[in-house]
Image: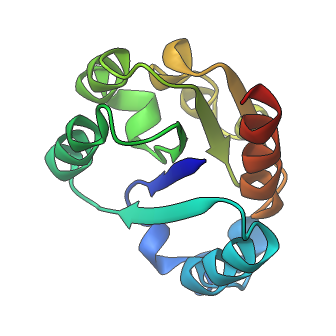
């Protein structure tokens, strides 16, 4: 199985950005742990602070991957364009949020991107990505 993990804006700062909300582990370090834990899965990772770059990457995925794990970060709450790009994908999508968006500000409690996800995992820290991979593996 070939799975893409995509992270949106400011998630390049994981490990240093608001560790009380997001933890103290860099995503690149956690990605290495995920890759070791799931040797049967081909994992790739992409992060961008730029909406257009995320959309371009989603379009490049068409026909190339079996599943997507997406943490759209703030773009989930604001980007109809990102949601439209997800609509073009013919693969299972799992949306992940490290913090519990339902326990945060009101504007964070809705995401446009969730309409295209088969499941959302929120508030489980980085372990939410592991749970997402497990869900995708059960669907294959």
Q: Can you say which quadrant of the picture contains the C terminus?
A: top right
Position of residue 21 measured from the top left corner of the image (x, y, whole percent): 73, 65
The answer to whether residue 84 of the structure is visible from this angle is yes
Q: Relative to 121, say whether 36 is above or below.
A: below
Residue closer to the observer: 73 or 108: 73
Residue 51 sits in quarter: top left
Horizontal and vertical percent for residue 84? 28, 17
In the image, is 6 to the left or to the right of 102?
Answer: left
Q: Residue 131 placed where, x, y %?
A: 83, 48
Count of picture labels = 0
Q: Position of residue 3 (x, y in %)?
A: 54, 50
Q: What residue is shown at x 21% (from left), y 35% (from top)?
A: 59
In this view of the protein, can residue 23 be seen by the observer? Answer: no
Q: Quadrant of residue 48?
A: bottom left
Above or below, 99 against 27 in this view is above
Q: Classify 55 as above or below 118.
A: below
Tell me which residue sits at (29%, 20%) in the image: 80
| Rendered image coloring scheme | rainbow
Along the line of sight, the residue nearer the viewer: 65 or 101: 65
């Amino acid at each position: 199985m070939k799975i893409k993990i995509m992270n949106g804006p400011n998630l390049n700062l994981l490990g240093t950005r608001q560790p009380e909300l997001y933890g103290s582990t860099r995503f690149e370090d956690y990605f290495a742990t995920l890759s070791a834990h799931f040797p049967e899965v081909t994992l790739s990772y992409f992060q961008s602070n730029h909406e257009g770059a995320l959309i371009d990457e989603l379009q490049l995925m068409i026909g190339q991957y079996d599943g997507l794990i997406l943490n759209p970060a703030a773009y989930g709450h604001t980007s109809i364009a990102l949601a439209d790009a997800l609509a073009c994908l013919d693969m299972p999508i799992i949306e992940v949020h490290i913090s519990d968006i339902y326990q945060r500000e009101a504007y964070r409690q809705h995401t446009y991107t969730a309409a295209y996800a088969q499941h959302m995992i929120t508030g489980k820290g980085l372990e939410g990505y592991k749970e997402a991979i497990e869900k995708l593996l059960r669907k294959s």
